[in-house]
Image (tube, rainbow, N blue to C red):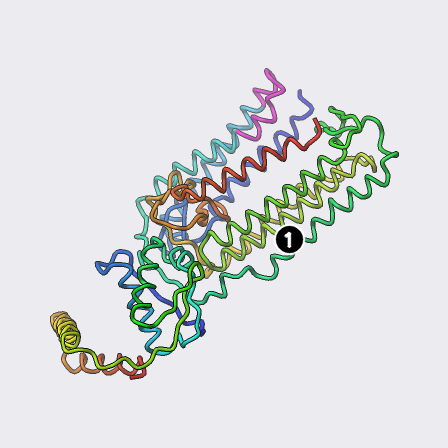
Amino acid sequence: MNSLLPFALLLTAFTGALMLLLPHISPHRYFFAITVAPGFRSSDQGRASLRRYNAAVVCSVVIAVVATLGVDQSEPRLTVPMAALSPALLGLAAFLLERSQVRRFAAPVSAVREAELAPEHDHLPRWIALTLPPFALPLAAAAYLRAHWDEIPARFPVHFDAHNVANRWADKTARAVYGPLVFAGGGMLIMILLILAMFYGSRRGRQRTAILKMMVAVIYFMGLLFTGIGIMPALQFSPSVLFIPALAFPLILLVWIIFVLRDPKMPADATPDECWTLGAIYYNRQDPAIFVQRRIGFGYTPNFGNPLSWLIMGGFVAALLGLVFTLPR
Amino acid sequence: MPSSAKIRIDLNSQVPAYRQIVDAVRVLLVDGTLPPGSDLPSVRRLAMELGVHFNTVGEAYRALAEEGWLDLRHGRGASVIARGSPGAAPPERLQEFRVQLRNLVAQMRSAGVPPTRIAAELRAAMESLHL
């Protein structure tokens, strides 16, 4: 038996739980990414729909467990990918299947649009400045590494397996030592640029404020996590120390999203159903918005009908790829 | 600017979107919700909020500027300006309004609204515009 099997099975259970949560961590206005009447979720059809979906997800988790056990016997190196991917893919199939059922109960999307004529909402809120303090973390770590350069071993671990055993090493060079910190700073800068693009490229509303606040929290998390990783060559602590915050943060974010979505008055972007493909890809050439609210999960997605979205997403991907090259190899 | 300065348009209406924007903003200008000195959102921002093309909002702002309500600033939206009392409308313009009013009253009658109610609605509309 692969020693990673218990971890893999936990991953399957976690992914399955996430799939079960999926209809609940999306704006109330939508049910399986379809616009429905306000009370539809608690109606007989809505409850039946959720029951069917939950049963399908539970079945998909059982199938994923069986497949993972099978792969563990024949191809142990595929155990973890199988454990993570199979429940996600099967769950997604169940979601799309249920989506096609819910389509019959779709409510007409109102063509009425309302706009406030107050321009003050177009100015960046002051709390956006909170994105700047986290940059002090990688800067402080870099200063510490520079001051303790002699204490860094000639070769140090840069990658660990699931048992916390180092399986990749790097020579002590400026790139290897400072790389994770540059990655942290660059990643946080990209996040700030995305926040600005989303602020100016999406419609106003309380949902925009909530999403942007979550992104600010992500910047803090990135700063802490990558500074922790970056300082490891000098302090040489176990990477398991970073495991708990790395797992805890997504859970905190999940609870935050559920809390925000519990507010029945939380508005959602009014976008036409017919402009969505698979409930996740938005393409509307008539809509000048660059980003629109997602229907699955809570956040923004690009409007692929707007050329500016392609430009921004292209820049985002190019910047990410550029950052990857700063990491030690 | 009071927070109630909102406009609403119907994308399925037969009335063009730019005309709906002009009419809605004009009501707020006439009733004083948008006093002189108020800033309006940029063309890009208002178009995004309403889900219409930039040109639609641009055309609406230009129409209101031609009526003397707005001062357009390149790339920065528009602001409301003090508008002196316009002179009496020329007879042909007055005739145009008369036709529009007659059509509206006829539509209301044909929809079953009694004459007393029509008169009351017209009075209420006048009062809401502080006229």
**Residue A112 location, x and y as percent?**
32, 59
Q: Is residue A234 magenta?
A: no
**Residue A29 location, x and y as percent?**
41, 53
Find numbered disc 1 in the image and state the secondary structure of the residue it sits on. Answer: helix
Which secondary structure is most common in the magenta stretch? helix
The residue positioned farthest toward the top in the image shown: A74
Work out whether residue A127 or residue B74 is closer to the camera in this orientation and state it: B74
Residue that mark 1 sits on: A131
Q: Is residue A314 above or below residue A219?
A: above
Q: Is residue B102 above or below residue A256?
A: below
Q: Which residues are magenta?
A: A69-85
| Amino acid type of the residue that numbered disc 1 sits on in the rendered structure | Thr
**Residue A275 location, x and y as percent?**
35, 44
Q: Is residue A74 magenta?
A: yes
Left-right relation of A267 to A196: left
Residue at the spot 49% in from the left edge and 46% down from the top edge: A297
Quadrant, the N terminus of chain A: top right
**Residue A183 location, x and y as percent?**
67, 38
Work out whether residue A296 or residue B81 is closer to the camera in this orientation and state it: B81
Residue at the spot 78% in from the left edge and 29% down from the top edge: A173
Quadrant, the C terminus of chain A: top right
